[in-house]
Image (cartoon, helix red, strand yellow):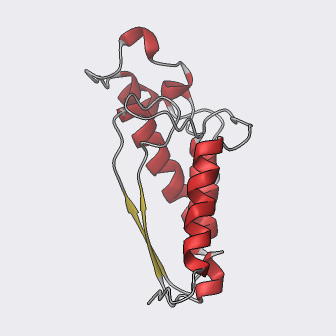
Amino acid sequence: MARRFNPEGVVLTCGADCLRGDPLSSMDLSNGALWRATLALADAAPAAVVLGGGGYNPWTVARAWAGLWGCISGRAIPDVLPEAARTLLRGLSCELVDAEDIRPEWTERLSDVSNPGGVRDEVLALALGAQDADRRPGKNID
C-alpha cells in the first residue's frame, strides 16, 4: 500500500510499545513482526530514515532496537545473546514490570518467539478505515 504513493523517502519511528510484554499496551506483537514491517516500509522508498521510539519495557525495547539495527545492517541475529548482553539485560529493572513477569527469553535471546495469529477485528477496522479514507473523492495526500 505504501508504494502506491511513490514516496521519495520515508521516516519511520519504531516504537516498541506495540510488543508483547509492554505493560501499557496490548498489541502483543513479536519483535520479528516489527522488524519485518519496518524493513518492508523502508523498502517502499529509495531513501529511509529509521528512528527508535517509545516503549515501557526496557527488555523488549533494547532487544527490539538492537535487532532492528542488526536487520537493517544485514547482520545475523544470534540464537543466544553473548554473555555481556545477557548480563546487561539481567541488570535492568522497571517499576512497571513485576519481577515475576520478566520472561526468560528477554535476557537470553534477541528475537522473540513467533506469535502467530490473526489481526484483531478492531485493528483491522482501523487499517481498513485508513485505507478507505485515502480513496475518498477530494482527499489530497501531499
The total number of labels drawn is 0
The residue at the far front in this view is: 137
User: From the viewer's perspective, is residue 72 above or below residue 93?
Assistant: below
Q: Is residue 77 visible?
A: no
Residue sitting at x 54%, y 34%: 81
Position of 5 compared to 49: left or right?
A: right
Position of residue 6 measured from the top left corner of the image (x, y, whole percent): 59, 89
Residue sitting at x 64%, y 51%: 124
Position of residue 74 measured from the top left corner of the image (x, y, whole percent): 62, 64
Q: Is residue 104 visible?
A: yes
Residue sitting at x 61%, y 35%: 112
The residue at the far left in this view is: 95
> What is the quadrant of residue 46 in the picture?
bottom right
For this rendering, which residue is in front, 104 or 7? 7
Residue sitting at x 56%, y 77%: 134
For this rendering, which residue is in front, 1 or 140? 140
Quadrant in which the C terminus appears: bottom left
Position of 48 compared to 121: left or right?
A: left
> What is the quadrant of residue 136 in the picture?
bottom right
Position of residue 72 measured from the top left corner of the image (x, y, whole percent): 55, 64
Quadrant in which the N terminus appears: bottom right
The residue at the far top in this view is: 100
Position of residue 4 measured from the top left corner of the image (x, y, whole percent): 65, 85
User: From the viewer's perspective, is residue 77 above or below residue 92?
Assistant: below
User: From the viewer's perspective, is residue 40 above or below residue 100?
Assistant: below
